[in-house]
Amino acid sequence: MTADTSINQSIINQWVAENKDTQQLQQNLAALGWDEEVIAKHLAAFKTILHEKKRCKGFFFLAAGALLGFISCVLSIINPIPALYNLILFGLTSLAILIIFLGLYYIME
């Protein structure tokens, strides 16, 4: 008789909502008597969802940084307020670069 190895998505979504740790989950599932293969499949699906959330957050930061960099570029070219030129050129551009690198960190992590 074969065991049912399908992944229960509702359990995984509950783990994500509760922000569970993978080692703690593995120990809890082993204590409940789950098969090692089923535990491995569920943990792999759980990790995939966590990575997708981080990747989505990273792309959001990339888009926000790119938009801020574009605004900084346009404001530097137009120079609507000459007194704020250095703040726009160096401040906003540096902030945009930092936000972009934060997005890259979340994507590459």
Image (cartoon, rainbow, N blue to C red):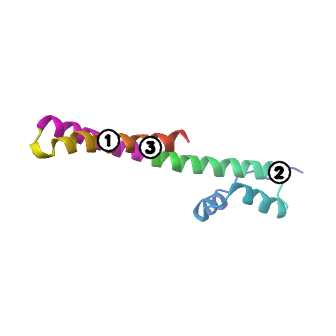
- Is 18 displayed left or right of 38 in the figure? left
* Residues drawn in magenta: 60-78
Q: Residues within 10 Å of mark 3 (few under 14, many from 20)?
A: many
Please name the amino acid that badge 1 sits on: Ser
Determine the CA span between mark 3 and mark 2: 35 Å
- Is 61 displayed left or right of 36 in the figure? left
Q: Nearer the viewer, mark 2 or mark 1?
A: 1
| Disc 3 secondary structure class | helix
- The quadrant in which residue 87 appears is top left
Is the residue under label 1 in contact with that under label 2 (CB below 8 Å)?
no
Please name the amino acid that badge 3 sits on: Gly
Please name the amino acid that badge 2 sits on: Glu
- The quadrant in which residue 32 appears is bottom right
Q: Which mark is residue 94?
A: 1
Q: Position of residue 81 (x, y in %)?
A: 10, 45
Marked residue nearer the N-terminal end (1 or 3): 1
Q: Position of residue 102 (x, y in %)?
A: 44, 44
Q: Residues within 10 Å of mark 1 (few under 14, many from 20)?
A: some
Identity of the residue drawn at 76% across and 56% down: 26
Determine the CA span between mark 1 and mark 3: 14 Å
Residue 22, compared with residue 61, is above or below; it is below
- Is 21 displayed left or right of 1 in the figure? left
| Disc 2 secondary structure class | helix
In the rendered image, residue 23 lying in the magenta stretch gets the answer no
Determine the CA span between mark 2 and mark 1: 49 Å
Frontmost residue, 70 versus 86: 86
Q: Nearer the viewer, mark 3 or mark 2?
A: 3
Identity of the residue drawn at 28% across and 40% down: 93
Q: Which mark is residue 103?
A: 3
- Is 96 displayed left or right of 57 in the figure? left
Tell me the residue that label 2 is attached to: 36
